[in-house]
Image (tube, grey):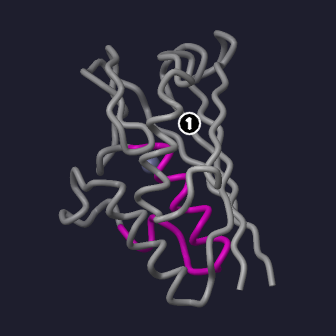
């Protein structure tokens, strides 16, 4: 049996000193605002995984009004969600993601991001893919007010 899951996340960008994307920190003049480390990509992946297994969503598992989640490492949240999915009998087959960001350029960081995600999930790097799109200079993405990410996953039992 196969299931697919879809995840989407958006974070506001504010002046700062680096973006956490896919578990790595990219040098940048802005940072993503959020209760945890605001890793937009890992949040989208976490929601996609939970959705595929019908196990809730990231906001239910890790409420942002819980002080325990302040500044929390999103890789740890993803790992916890993946463990729930595995406990329910599912195996992650692959995931495919899109980052929406006007700046910085994401593709030079793709190998490191794929490596990191594969390590967090304990899967082969070939099962993790990532694309990047700008906002073409318009809208909240294009004017660098926000960064967003989407992810689809396939799981099997
Ligand atoms: Zn988020």
- Measured along the vertical axis of the image, is residue 139 above or below residue 146? above
Q: Would you identify the image quadrant in which residue 4 lies?
A: bottom right
For the N terminus, which image quadrant? Answer: bottom right
- SS category of the residue bearing label 1: strand
Residue sitting at the far right: 1
For the C terminus, which image quadrant? Answer: bottom right
Residue 55 as seen in the image, left or right of residue 16 = right
Question: Number of marks in the image?
Answer: 1
Q: Considering the whole magenta stretch, tell me its main secondary structure.
A: helix
What residue do we see at 53% from left, 32% from top? 110
What residue do we see at 62% from left, 77% from top? 91
Residue sitting nearer the eye, 97 or 69? 97
What residue do we see at 72% from left, 79% from top? 156
Q: Would you identify the image quadrant in which residue 12 lies?
A: top left
Residue 98 as seen in the image, left or right of residue 124 = right
The magenta segment = 39-62
Within 10 Å of disc 1 (Cα), the crowding (few <14, some 14-19, many 20+) is many
What residue do we see at 66% from left, 13% from top? 138
Q: Position of residue 146 (x, y in %)?
A: 50, 28
- Measured along the vertical axis of the image, is residue 138 above or below residue 2? above
Residue 137 as seen in the image, left or right of residue 12 = right
Q: Would you identify the image quadrant in which residue 34 lies?
A: top left
80 in magenta: no
- Measured along the vertical axis of the image, is residue 56 above or below residue 28? below
Q: Position of residue 20 (x, y in %)?
A: 36, 36
52 in magenta: yes
Q: Position of residue 62 (x, y in %)?
A: 36, 68
Q: Position of residue 51 (x, y in %)?
A: 64, 70
Residue sitting nearer the eye, 76 or 107? 107
Mark 1 sits near ligand 1, with its Cβ under 8 Å away: no
Residue 32 as seen in the image, left or right of residue 97 = left
Q: What residue is shown with label 1?
A: 148
């Amino acid at each position: 049996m196969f299931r697919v899951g879809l995840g989407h996340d958006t974070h506001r960008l504010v002046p700062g000193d680096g973006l956490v994307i896919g578990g790595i920190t990219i040098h940048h003049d802005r940072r993503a605002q959020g209760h945890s480390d605001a890793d937009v990509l890992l949040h989208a992946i976490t929601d996609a995984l939970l959705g595929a297994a019908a196990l809730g969503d990231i906001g239910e598992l890790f409420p942002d009004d819980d002080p325990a989640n302040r500044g929390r490492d999103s890789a740890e949240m993803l790992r916890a969600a993946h463990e729930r999915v595995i406990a329910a009998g599912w195996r992650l087959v692959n995931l495919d993601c899109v980052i929406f960001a006007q700046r910085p350029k994401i593709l030079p960081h793709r190998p490191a991001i794929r490596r990191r995600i594969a390590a967090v999930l304990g899967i082969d790097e070939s099962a993790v893919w990532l694309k990047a799109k700008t906002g073409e200079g318009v809208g909240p993405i294009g004017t660098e007010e926000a960064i967003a990410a989407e992810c689809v996953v396939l799981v099997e039992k």
